[in-house]
Amino acid sequence: MGGGFLVDEHISLTQCASDTSSFGTFSVADPKALSLLQQETYTLSAPGSVPDRQDAPHVHDAVLDPTKKFLVAPDLGADLVHVYSVGGSKSFTPLTPIKAVTGSGPRHAAFAVCGDKTFLYTVNELSNSITGYSVVYAKGDAEPTFTQLFNFSTHGPNGTVPAGTKAAEIVVSPDQRFVIVSSRGEGLLKIPNFDVANTTALASDPLVSFSIDDRTGALAVVQTAPAGGMNPRGFSLNKAGTLVASALQDDNRVVVIERNVKTGLLGKIVAHATVGVGAGNGPNYALFYE
Protein backbone atom coordinates (compact mmCIF):
# COMPACT_ATOMS: atom_id res chain seq x y z
CA MET A 1 0.00 0.00 0.00
CA GLY A 2 1.37 3.36 -0.98
CA GLY A 3 0.26 6.79 0.08
CA GLY A 4 0.69 9.61 2.54
CA PHE A 5 -0.74 10.66 5.86
CA LEU A 6 -0.90 13.61 8.20
CA VAL A 7 -2.11 14.44 11.66
CA ASP A 8 -4.27 17.56 11.86
CA GLU A 9 -5.23 19.75 14.78
CA HIS A 10 -8.37 17.67 15.39
CA ILE A 11 -6.15 14.72 16.34
CA SER A 12 -7.22 12.67 13.37
CA LEU A 13 -5.17 10.66 10.93
CA THR A 14 -5.67 11.01 7.19
CA GLN A 15 -4.52 8.15 4.98
CA CYS A 16 -4.35 7.72 1.22
CA ALA A 17 -4.10 4.19 -0.17
CA SER A 18 -2.94 4.20 -3.78
CA ASP A 19 -3.52 0.49 -4.30
CA THR A 20 -7.17 0.61 -3.20
CA SER A 21 -7.97 4.05 -4.70
CA SER A 22 -9.23 5.26 -1.34
CA PHE A 23 -8.97 8.18 1.03
CA GLY A 24 -9.80 7.76 4.71
CA THR A 25 -9.66 9.49 8.05
CA PHE A 26 -9.24 7.86 11.43
CA SER A 27 -9.60 9.00 15.01
CA VAL A 28 -6.45 8.64 17.07
CA ALA A 29 -8.13 9.55 20.36
CA ASP A 30 -7.09 6.07 21.44
CA PRO A 31 -3.74 5.39 19.72
CA LYS A 32 -4.10 1.68 20.50
CA ALA A 33 -7.42 1.39 18.67
CA LEU A 34 -7.72 3.64 15.62
CA SER A 35 -11.31 4.06 14.47
CA LEU A 36 -12.43 4.89 10.94
CA LEU A 37 -14.22 8.24 10.68
CA GLN A 38 -14.73 8.59 6.96
CA GLN A 39 -13.68 6.85 3.76
CA GLU A 40 -14.04 7.66 0.09
CA THR A 41 -13.19 5.33 -2.78
CA TYR A 42 -12.52 6.79 -6.22
CA THR A 43 -13.26 5.31 -9.64
CA LEU A 44 -12.24 6.04 -13.22
CA SER A 45 -14.65 5.73 -16.15
CA ALA A 46 -11.73 4.94 -18.48
CA PRO A 47 -7.93 4.61 -18.25
CA GLY A 48 -5.89 7.80 -18.45
CA SER A 49 -3.38 8.84 -21.10
CA VAL A 50 -0.75 6.52 -19.55
CA PRO A 51 -2.95 3.38 -19.42
CA ASP A 52 -0.47 1.06 -17.72
CA ARG A 53 -0.15 3.48 -14.77
CA GLN A 54 -3.52 5.20 -14.93
CA ASP A 55 -5.89 2.22 -15.02
CA ALA A 56 -7.40 3.35 -11.70
CA PRO A 57 -7.16 6.30 -9.30
CA HIS A 58 -3.97 6.23 -7.22
CA VAL A 59 -4.10 8.79 -4.41
CA HIS A 60 -0.57 9.14 -3.04
CA ASP A 61 -0.58 11.97 -0.53
CA ALA A 62 -2.70 14.13 1.77
CA VAL A 63 -1.56 17.63 2.72
CA LEU A 64 -3.24 20.14 5.01
CA ASP A 65 -3.15 23.69 3.68
CA PRO A 66 -1.63 26.58 5.70
CA THR A 67 -5.04 27.75 6.96
CA LYS A 68 -5.84 24.21 8.19
CA LYS A 69 -9.27 24.59 6.59
CA PHE A 70 -8.54 22.64 3.42
CA LEU A 71 -6.75 19.49 2.38
CA VAL A 72 -5.32 18.41 -0.98
CA ALA A 73 -4.71 14.85 -2.17
CA PRO A 74 -2.77 14.28 -5.42
CA ASP A 75 -4.16 11.44 -7.55
CA LEU A 76 -1.55 9.94 -9.90
CA GLY A 77 -4.07 7.75 -11.71
CA ALA A 78 -6.72 10.37 -12.41
CA ASP A 79 -4.46 13.39 -13.12
CA LEU A 80 -6.28 15.30 -10.39
CA VAL A 81 -5.50 16.95 -7.09
CA HIS A 82 -8.55 16.33 -4.91
CA VAL A 83 -9.50 19.24 -2.65
CA TYR A 84 -11.46 18.93 0.61
CA SER A 85 -12.74 21.33 3.21
CA VAL A 86 -12.01 20.34 6.79
CA GLY A 87 -15.06 20.34 9.03
CA GLY A 88 -15.14 20.99 12.74
CA SER A 89 -16.54 17.51 13.31
CA LYS A 90 -13.40 15.92 11.82
CA SER A 91 -15.20 15.47 8.49
CA PHE A 92 -13.82 16.20 5.04
CA THR A 93 -16.10 17.52 2.28
CA PRO A 94 -15.01 17.17 -1.36
CA LEU A 95 -14.66 20.41 -3.33
CA THR A 96 -13.77 21.12 -6.96
CA PRO A 97 -10.59 19.16 -7.77
CA ILE A 98 -7.57 20.66 -9.50
CA LYS A 99 -7.13 19.30 -13.02
CA ALA A 100 -3.47 18.39 -13.38
CA VAL A 101 -1.55 18.37 -16.66
CA THR A 102 -2.70 15.37 -18.70
CA GLY A 103 -0.42 12.38 -18.23
CA SER A 104 1.60 14.06 -15.48
CA GLY A 105 0.53 11.78 -12.63
CA PRO A 106 0.69 14.10 -9.59
CA ARG A 107 2.24 12.19 -6.68
CA HIS A 108 3.03 14.50 -3.75
CA ALA A 109 2.34 18.16 -2.92
CA ALA A 110 3.62 20.97 -0.70
CA PHE A 111 2.44 24.48 0.15
CA ALA A 112 4.61 27.58 0.50
CA VAL A 113 3.54 30.79 2.23
CA CYS A 114 5.47 33.84 1.07
CA GLY A 115 4.24 36.95 2.84
CA ASP A 116 0.61 37.39 1.86
CA LYS A 117 0.89 34.92 -1.05
CA THR A 118 0.36 31.16 -0.99
CA PHE A 119 1.61 28.69 -3.58
CA LEU A 120 1.05 24.97 -4.11
CA TYR A 121 3.60 22.73 -5.80
CA THR A 122 3.09 19.16 -6.99
CA VAL A 123 5.77 16.70 -8.06
CA ASN A 124 4.49 14.53 -10.89
CA GLU A 125 5.76 10.97 -11.19
CA LEU A 126 4.73 10.06 -14.73
CA SER A 127 6.03 13.20 -16.48
CA ASN A 128 8.90 13.83 -14.04
CA SER A 129 7.78 17.39 -13.63
CA ILE A 130 6.83 20.03 -11.08
CA THR A 131 3.64 22.05 -11.39
CA GLY A 132 3.18 25.31 -9.53
CA TYR A 133 -0.13 26.94 -8.62
CA SER A 134 -1.11 30.21 -7.00
CA VAL A 135 -3.65 29.81 -4.21
CA VAL A 136 -6.21 32.54 -3.61
CA TYR A 137 -8.51 32.29 -0.61
CA ALA A 138 -12.03 33.67 -0.77
CA LYS A 139 -13.71 35.32 2.22
CA GLY A 140 -15.13 33.00 4.84
CA ASP A 141 -14.90 29.30 4.20
CA ALA A 142 -15.46 29.41 0.43
CA GLU A 143 -13.16 27.10 -1.50
CA PRO A 144 -9.82 28.53 -2.66
CA THR A 145 -8.90 29.12 -6.29
CA PHE A 146 -5.88 27.31 -7.74
CA THR A 147 -4.32 28.81 -10.89
CA GLN A 148 -1.51 27.00 -12.69
CA LEU A 149 1.68 29.05 -12.94
CA PHE A 150 4.09 26.66 -14.63
CA ASN A 151 4.90 23.04 -15.38
CA PHE A 152 8.46 21.93 -16.08
CA SER A 153 11.01 19.15 -15.51
CA THR A 154 12.16 18.15 -12.04
CA HIS A 155 15.54 19.44 -13.24
CA GLY A 156 14.11 22.84 -14.16
CA PRO A 157 12.94 24.38 -17.43
CA ASN A 158 14.30 22.42 -20.42
CA GLY A 159 15.67 19.80 -18.02
CA THR A 160 15.73 16.12 -19.00
CA VAL A 161 15.84 12.79 -17.16
CA PRO A 162 16.91 9.28 -18.25
CA ALA A 163 14.29 6.76 -19.33
CA GLY A 164 12.77 4.94 -16.39
CA THR A 165 13.08 7.89 -14.00
CA LYS A 166 10.27 8.40 -11.46
CA ALA A 167 9.86 11.64 -9.51
CA ALA A 168 9.06 10.96 -5.86
CA GLU A 169 9.00 13.50 -3.02
CA ILE A 170 8.61 17.27 -2.72
CA VAL A 171 9.31 19.37 0.39
CA VAL A 172 9.22 23.11 1.10
CA SER A 173 11.91 24.30 3.50
CA PRO A 174 10.79 25.51 6.95
CA ASP A 175 11.63 29.12 6.02
CA GLN A 176 9.41 28.84 2.91
CA ARG A 177 12.30 29.91 0.64
CA PHE A 178 13.17 26.65 -1.13
CA VAL A 179 11.59 23.60 -2.75
CA ILE A 180 13.42 20.26 -2.85
CA VAL A 181 12.39 17.26 -4.97
CA SER A 182 13.76 13.73 -5.24
CA SER A 183 14.11 11.74 -8.44
CA ARG A 184 14.40 7.95 -8.61
CA GLY A 185 16.15 5.83 -11.23
CA GLU A 186 18.71 8.32 -12.55
CA GLY A 187 21.86 7.05 -10.83
CA LEU A 188 24.10 9.61 -12.56
CA LEU A 189 25.74 11.08 -9.45
CA LYS A 190 28.48 9.52 -7.33
CA ILE A 191 29.15 9.47 -3.58
CA PRO A 192 32.08 8.05 -1.57
CA ASN A 193 31.74 4.47 -0.43
CA PHE A 194 30.49 4.06 3.13
CA ASP A 195 33.13 1.36 3.62
CA VAL A 196 36.22 3.47 4.21
CA ALA A 197 38.40 0.59 3.01
CA ASN A 198 36.59 0.54 -0.34
CA THR A 199 37.52 3.27 -2.82
CA THR A 200 34.76 2.38 -5.31
CA ALA A 201 32.29 5.25 -5.57
CA LEU A 202 28.57 4.52 -5.26
CA ALA A 203 25.81 5.61 -7.63
CA SER A 204 23.23 8.08 -6.34
CA ASP A 205 19.96 9.59 -7.47
CA PRO A 206 19.55 13.35 -7.00
CA LEU A 207 17.85 15.79 -4.70
CA VAL A 208 17.15 18.95 -6.72
CA SER A 209 16.80 22.24 -4.85
CA PHE A 210 14.95 25.31 -6.15
CA SER A 211 14.64 28.82 -4.78
CA ILE A 212 11.13 30.32 -4.57
CA ASP A 213 10.40 33.78 -5.95
CA ASP A 214 8.26 35.12 -3.12
CA ARG A 215 6.42 37.51 -5.46
CA THR A 216 5.48 35.13 -8.26
CA GLY A 217 5.99 31.61 -6.91
CA ALA A 218 8.42 30.85 -9.74
CA LEU A 219 11.16 28.30 -9.06
CA ALA A 220 14.84 28.50 -10.06
CA VAL A 221 17.30 25.61 -9.81
CA VAL A 222 19.84 26.12 -7.05
CA GLN A 223 21.57 22.74 -6.90
CA THR A 224 21.45 19.10 -7.98
CA ALA A 225 23.02 17.06 -5.17
CA PRO A 226 23.37 13.36 -4.34
CA ALA A 227 20.51 11.91 -2.30
CA GLY A 228 22.86 9.44 -0.63
CA GLY A 229 22.09 6.45 -2.85
CA MET A 230 19.41 4.97 -5.04
CA ASN A 231 15.63 5.38 -4.92
CA PRO A 232 15.13 8.34 -2.53
CA ARG A 233 11.44 7.59 -2.17
CA GLY A 234 10.92 9.94 0.78
CA PHE A 235 12.92 12.55 2.67
CA SER A 236 12.35 15.30 5.22
CA LEU A 237 14.02 18.34 6.77
CA ASN A 238 14.49 19.02 10.45
CA LYS A 239 12.67 22.01 11.94
CA ALA A 240 15.73 24.24 11.64
CA GLY A 241 16.20 23.28 7.98
CA THR A 242 19.86 22.41 8.62
CA LEU A 243 19.57 18.67 7.95
CA VAL A 244 17.93 16.40 5.37
CA ALA A 245 17.05 12.78 6.19
CA SER A 246 16.90 10.75 2.97
CA ALA A 247 15.46 7.22 2.72
CA LEU A 248 17.16 5.15 0.01
CA GLN A 249 14.82 2.25 -0.66
CA ASP A 250 17.03 0.31 -3.08
CA ASP A 251 20.14 0.61 -0.92
CA ASN A 252 18.54 -0.28 2.44
CA ARG A 253 19.94 2.95 3.80
CA VAL A 254 19.01 6.22 5.50
CA VAL A 255 21.43 9.13 5.36
CA VAL A 256 21.47 12.55 7.01
CA ILE A 257 22.84 15.38 4.87
CA GLU A 258 23.90 18.81 6.10
CA ARG A 259 22.14 21.82 4.56
CA ASN A 260 22.97 25.54 4.46
CA VAL A 261 19.78 27.38 5.44
CA LYS A 262 20.85 30.67 3.83
CA THR A 263 21.87 29.30 0.42
CA GLY A 264 19.74 26.15 0.36
CA LEU A 265 22.78 24.10 -0.67
CA LEU A 266 23.23 20.53 0.53
CA GLY A 267 26.62 19.50 1.84
CA LYS A 268 28.23 16.31 3.04
CA ILE A 269 26.58 13.24 4.52
CA VAL A 270 27.00 13.46 8.29
CA ALA A 271 25.31 10.19 9.33
CA HIS A 272 24.03 6.98 7.80
CA ALA A 273 22.40 3.73 8.87
CA THR A 274 21.37 0.43 7.31
CA VAL A 275 17.61 -0.10 7.35
CA GLY A 276 16.10 -3.38 6.17
CA VAL A 277 17.72 -6.45 4.70
CA GLY A 278 17.37 -7.71 1.14
CA ALA A 279 15.79 -6.36 -2.01
CA GLY A 280 12.45 -4.65 -1.58
CA ASN A 281 12.88 -4.15 2.17
CA GLY A 282 14.51 -0.73 2.17
CA PRO A 283 13.03 2.37 3.87
CA ASN A 284 10.29 4.38 2.16
CA TYR A 285 10.57 7.48 4.31
CA ALA A 286 12.74 9.15 6.94
CA LEU A 287 11.32 11.67 9.40
CA PHE A 288 12.96 13.73 12.14
CA TYR A 289 11.43 13.26 15.59
CA GLU A 290 11.80 16.60 17.37
Image: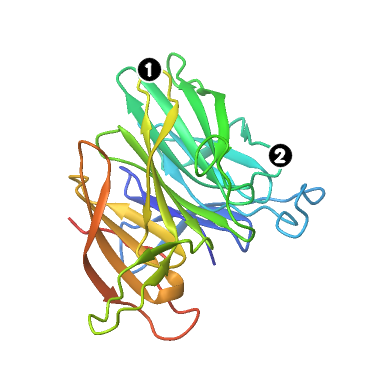
> Callout 2 environment at 10 Å: few (<14), some (14 to 19), or many (20+)?
some
Between 185 and 70, which is closer to the camera in this rendering? 185
Between 255 and 285, which is closer to the camera in this rendering? 255
Reply above or below: 117 against 17. Answer: above
**Hey, which quadrant is residue 65 in on the image?**
top left
**Hey, which quadrant is residue 94 in on the image?**
top right
Residue type, label 1: Arg
Residue type, label 2: Thr
> Callout 1 environment at 10 Å: few (<14), some (14 to 19), or many (20+)?
few
Can the viewer see residue 65? Answer: no
Residue assigned mark 1: 215
First in sequence: mark 2 vs mark 1:
2
- Residue farthest along the front direction in this orientation: 199
Report the quarter where the C terminus lies: bottom left
- Residue farthest along the right direction in this orientation: 46
Residue 84 position within the rendered picture, expressed as x and y whole percent measured from the top left: 52, 36
Reply above or below: 55 against 142. Answer: below
Count of marks, rendered view: 2
Reply above or below: 90 against 289. Answer: above
Reply above or below: 254 against 62. Answer: below
